[in-house]
């Protein structure tokens, strides 16, 4: 740990910024509640605190030949909650102070994220420490030297014509769409600003999706060049591509969870229990994962299973109201009917599962309609939620005969329902009787999770109609005060 020594004599801030960027940040960039890197203790408002390996890494990343930086693109990739954002904000303020008239643009997955994170950290520092003067508004920071710092929403056309001296990108593992990739291109360092740089802070993403981060990672890795550093924490972690003027710091694995005092074992133990294995590896171990590895953890399903006798006791002799979810796939897909009842304390019980697996090209909707009519006679069904794509005619028949309240479930609501059931699995709040497990398990194993769309997906060419129908039923059941 190191911190600029405080004396009664005011330092020459410009001389300090030129000679020692890290010392300048430790003197001028303040944090509301800095954490001790050694103990994790919350300290009074004061300067940012770096560990020695961070100091060395910053010195390497911001090294210059005259006024020209040795690296034009710097990637700082480490696990979640390891100080990436504060480091980026400190570098941002130092850069704007050092180079008068600079245009510094902050970007993230969306405009709000950019505003709330790096930009807000810069604003907080300026409000805490009046050493560096600035005019602050909701949308920009303007230093007396004419430098401007402002966030920009992810909108490539809006970035056209910008002339940034520095750009700061957050979580570019998600820069996979044409719009976001165009934004990266639009904001490339301009040749008219010789000292221009771009700073990237992000944890790892998904292999094979062609994100901006993956392209940078592959470039750095393929160069085969690693910076020799004095700090053991940096050994083998700093890759460079001289041709691309790229420096890529990549801290990953279990050892990356021991860098700072606030990284507590009990926190990561809890995270391992609640996150899918591949997501824990990506977010906390900073490891690249394959999208094919995004199947739901089987441990979640097993933790939700209860004895049939316990399920019967939850229902009681009078029974519980049931919401039915109905999902019909395309040709040669399954047709699933799932009943769910709320049983209190934020928990939901799966009452029945019926799957039609047609051998022909098409589902027999008359058979499905007969089954639904029978279920409404046997259970106190308060709603049938159905996919309107193929089931509208059948739903009309049921509604006409007053068999139950029949309500369509639009595709626009799918992400809400899927996210809800995903949370129920994770929290062990969707209770599954033992006798129903075999029917659910088959399709559960074929169900993946798309974190960008917040929806269930199909993996290994299987079926997931049961899981989708369950999501529809559980989500609609949550809307009733039962």
Image (cartoon, helix red, strand yellow):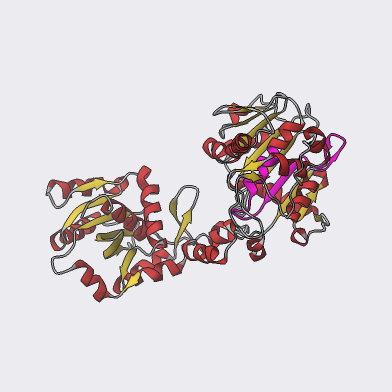
Instruction: Identify the residue shown where x is 24% and y is 46%.
Output: 407
Residue 450: say if magenta.
no
Is 84 contained in the magenta span?
yes
Instruction: State the image coordinates of residue 127 (x, y, percent, origin top left).
Output: 60, 34
Is residue 298 shown left or right of residue 233? Answer: left
Q: Nearer the viewer, residue 425 or 135?
A: 135
Measuring from the top left, give residue 397's x and y in whole percent. Answer: 17, 48
Q: Is residue 151 above or below residue 220?
A: above
Segment tinted magenta in the rendering: 63-92
Number of marks in the rendered image: 0
From the viewer's side, name the closer residue of 79 and 258: 258
On the rendered structure, is 395 left or right of 333?
Answer: left
At x 61%, y 49%, the residue is: 34
From the viewer's perspective, is residue 213 above or below residue 364? Answer: above
User: Which of 119 and 170 lies nearest the eye of the viewer?
Assistant: 119
| Residue 39 in picture, x, y percent from top left | 63, 60
Q: Is residue 28 above or below residue 438?
A: above
Residue found farthest to the right: 66
Query: Which residue is drawn at the image coordinates 45% and 68% (left, top)?
Result: 298
Instruction: Please state if 119 lies on the left or on the right of 410 as rendered.
Output: right
Instruction: Determine whether, in the image, residue 206 is placed left or right of residue 360.
Output: right
């Amino acid at each position: 740990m190191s911190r600029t020594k405080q004396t009664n004599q005011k330092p020459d801030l410009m001389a300090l910024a030129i000679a020692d960027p890290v010392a300048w940040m430790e003197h001028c960039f303040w944090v509301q509640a800095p954490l001790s890197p050694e103990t994790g203790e919350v300290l009074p408002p004061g300067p940012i605190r770096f560990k020695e390996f961070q100091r060395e890494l910053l010195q390497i990343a911001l090294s210059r030949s005259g006024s020209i930086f040795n690296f034009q693109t710097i990637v700082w990739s480490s696990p979640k909650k390891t100080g990436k954002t504060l480091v980026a904000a400190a570098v941002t303020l130092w850069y704007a102070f050092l180079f008068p008239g600079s245009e510094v643009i902050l970007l993230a997955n969306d405009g709000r994220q950019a505003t709330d994170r790096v930009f807000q950290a810069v604003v907080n520092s300026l409000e805490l420490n009046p050493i560096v003067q600035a005019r602050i508004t909701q949308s920009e920071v303007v230093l007396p030297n004419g430098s401007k710092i402002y966030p920009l929403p992810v909108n490539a056309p809006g970035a056209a014509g910008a002339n940034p001296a520095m750009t700061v990108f957050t979580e570019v593992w998600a820069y996979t769409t044409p719009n976001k990739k165009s934004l990266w291109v639009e904001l490339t360092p301009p040749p008219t600003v010789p000292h221009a740089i771009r700073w990237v802070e992000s944890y790892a993403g998904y292999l094979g999706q062609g994100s901006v981060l993956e392209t940078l990672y592959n470039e750095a890795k393929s160069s085969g060049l690693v910076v020799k550093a004095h700090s053991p924490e940096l050994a083998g972690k700093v890759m460079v591509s001289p041709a691309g003027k790229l420096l890529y710091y990549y801290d990953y694995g279990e050892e990356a969870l021991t860098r700072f005092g606030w990284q507590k074992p009990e926190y990561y133990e809890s995270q391992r229990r609640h996150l899918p294995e591949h997501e824990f590896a990506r977010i906390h171990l900073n490891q690249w994962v394959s999208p094919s590895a995004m199947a739901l953890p089987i441990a979640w399903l097993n933790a939700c299973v209860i004895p049939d006798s316990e399920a019967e006791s939850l229902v009681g002799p009078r029974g519980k109201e049931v919401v039915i979810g109905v999902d019909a796939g395309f040709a040669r897909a399954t047709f699933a009917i799932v009943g769910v009842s709320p049983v209190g304390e934020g928990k939901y019980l799966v009452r029945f599962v019926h799957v039609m697996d047609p051998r022909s090209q098409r589902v027999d909707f008359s058979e499905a309609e007969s089954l639904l009519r029978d279920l409404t006679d046997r259970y106190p069904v308060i709603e049938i939620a159905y996919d309107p794509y193929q089931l509208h005619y059948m739903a009309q028949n049921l509604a006409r005969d007053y068999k139950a309240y029949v309500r369509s479930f639009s595709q626009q609501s799918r992400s809400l329902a899927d996210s809800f059931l995903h949370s129920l699995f994770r929290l062990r709040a969707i209770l599954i009787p033992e006798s129903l497990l075999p029917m659910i398990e088959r399709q559960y194993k074929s169900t993946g999770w798309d974190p960008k769309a917040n929806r269930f997906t199909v993996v290994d060419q299987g079926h997931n109609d049961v899981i989708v129908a369950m999501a529809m039923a559980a989500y609609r059941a949550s809307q009733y005060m039962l």
